[in-house]
Image: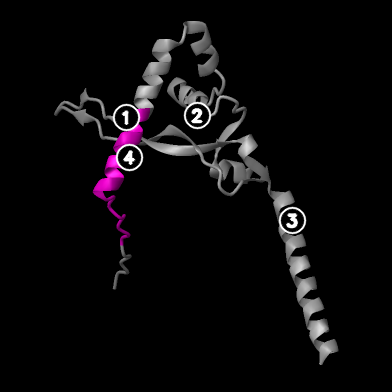
Amino acid sequence: MAKTSARKTRRQPTEAEKATRAAEITAFKEAVEAFEAATDEDALAGVTTRFPQYSDKNNILIHLQAPAATDVKAYRAWQAEGRQVRKGEHGIRIWAPAGKAEDETAADGKVTKAGRQFFRLVSVFDVTQTEDAAVLAAQADAAQADARALAAAAAFGDMVAA
């Protein structure tokens, strides 16, 4: 008998979530367009070349949200480098590829319409928003040792009082 796996279904966003996402997308598009229109070419070139791994539009988004950013990566990329994003830090939102629609082809095999590229908003973090994971682990170990010492002292105090 063939084993079938249950297919996970993604929760559908509510109308309020859809409206919030649409407003965020519109705000980012308008901010980039306004920045491009208000900035001279030399300043724009300086902004769009700061992070060569990201597109010009993403460089502008990074500049608008965190002008002092120096090294920007995704959450898991920082973890792979042994760093941890500090609790409570808000990400810098940029566009990331999210798949591509199939090309439309004619009967003779020629592409009649190229597939559309889709994007989604994702968060990235600057190095100033991270801490060294080894330091965090040492701090956690020290906190656990302090808690054990306090518990032992409390237990000793209970024995002496009895």
Identify the residue shown where x is 63% and y is 35%. 127
Callout 2: SS: helix
Identify residue type, mark 3: Gln
Answer whether labels 2 and 3 touch (C-beta < 8 Å): no
Distance, label 3 to label 4, CA atoms, is 38 Å
Callout 1: SS: helix
Callout 4: SS: helix
- Sequence-wise first label, 3 or 4: 4
In the image, 41 versus 151, the foreground residue is 151
Q: Name which quarter of the figure residue 160 lies in.
A: bottom right
Identify the residue shown where x is 54% and y is 22%. 52
Identify residue type, mark 2: Gln
Which numbered disc covers residue 66? none
Quadrant for the C terminus, please: bottom right
Q: Majority secondary structure of the magenta segment?
A: helix
- Sequence-wise first label, 2 or 1: 1
Identify residue type, mark 1: Thr
Residue 50 x, y percent position in the rendering: 57, 20
Quadrant for the N terminus, please: bottom left
- Sequence-wise first label, 2 or 4: 4
Q: Looking at this rendering, what residue extends furthest in the right direction? A: 160
Which numbered disc covers residue 65? 2
Distance, label 2 to label 3, CA atoms, is 31 Å
**22 in the magenta segment:** yes
- Coloration of the structure image: one colour
Residue 153 x, y percent position in the rendering: 81, 77
Q: Which residue is mark 4?
A: 21
Q: Which residue is mark 3?
A: 139
